[in-house]
Amino acid sequence: MDVEASGSIKDRLAHISDRIRSALHEVGRGEGGVRLVAASKSVTVDRLREAILAGVQIAGENRLQEALPKIDALKGERVTWHFIGQLQRRKVRTVVGVFELIHSVDSLELASEIDRRAADAGRRQKILLEINIGAEQSKAGFLVDEVEQELPRLAALNHVAIEGLMAVPPQARDPEQSRPHFRGLRELLERLRRQRLPGVSLTELSMGMSNDYVVAIQEGATLIRLGTAIFGGRRG
Ligand SMILES: *Cc1c(COP(=O)(O)O)cnc(C)c1O
């Protein structure tokens, strides 16, 4: 715990790797089943570069205006970019060209816009569906019932590849409080997979942040999104 509060980015990453490995081991999952996304909002280019040199392979950004100059500055580095923030429709065109995976697709309208822009660009954009797993009023994302109904329409979009689900459970001090939400997301993934829709792979679960990633891994996370645990505290 102390290592996460102080120490270098490299030390923190080493500590995180250990915790990932032991969480996988605890539940009998093989190594390599979890990819780390460094949530790099408000992190400078230099600190992000430091993280990349220490082994980070994926950077997750929330805001396009902030991400674009960083992506440009880090062009030579071996890192791929994921979009993890709320996405406005008018920004979709730019996002489709730049980000390998969009975690935060929260409506059929947004998915349709991504489909249209990806078609224009001659690409197939990988996406995750963001689920409002705690059914919180203030939060974006599909409700569970809603996504079960909408999946056929989403799957019919030929220029998006639906790779899985993402969620941010209700804020809680105790990571155990996130466990039922993580489990619920995994069960939802399994139910959606049973619809057996063509072109839908549904293998990824993007869940778990700095305070609850161990629990998320125990419940089946394949992508964890860590900011504070890697970079220390941030403003805003
Ligand atoms: C900031 C952010 C994270 C990382 O949060 P930490 O608590 O700092 O690990 C993960 N996911 C999303 C969508 C974020 O915006």
Image (cartoon, rainbow, N blue to C red):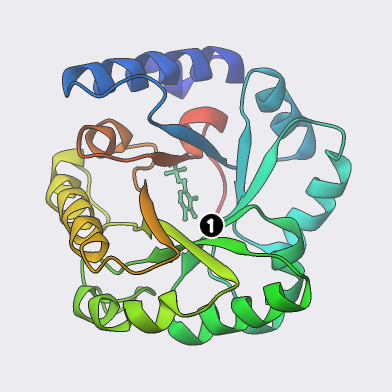
Question: Number of labelled discs?
Answer: 1
Q: Amino acid at mark 1?
A: Ile
Q: Where residue 25 sits: x, y (%)?
A: 23, 16
Quadrant assignment, res 76: top right
The one of 37 and 30 positioned closer to us in this rendering: 30
The one of 58 and 202 positioned closer to us in this rendering: 202
Q: Where residue 128 sits: x, y (%)?
A: 45, 61
The one of 142 and 157 positioned closer to us in this rendering: 157
Q: Is residue 216 above or below residue 62?
A: above
Report which residue position mark 1 lands on.
84
Q: Where residue 109 sits: x, y (%)?
A: 50, 87
At 35% from the left edge and 22% from the top edge, which residue is drawn?
20
Q: In the shown orientation, is residue 97 left or right of residue 214?
A: right
Quadrant assignment for the N terminus: top left
Q: In the shown orientation, is residue 87 left or right of residue 133?
A: right
Quadrant assignment for the C terminus: bottom right
Q: Where residue 172 sits: x, y (%)?
A: 22, 50
Quadrant assignment, res 56: top right
Residue 23 is at least partly visible in this image? yes
The one of 28 and 21 positioned closer to us in this rendering: 28
At 71% from the left edge and 30% from the top edge, which residue is drawn?
47
Q: Indicate yes or no: mark 1 CB to ligand 1 under 8 Å.
A: yes
Residue 8 is at least partly visible in this image? no
At 41% from the left edge and 40% from the top edge, which residue is drawn?
224
Q: Is residue 95 above or below residue 67?
A: below
Q: Residues within 10 Å of mark 1 (few under 14, many from 20)?
A: many
Q: Is residue 13 above or below residue 84?
A: above
Q: In the shown orientation, is residue 72 left or right of residue 12?
A: right
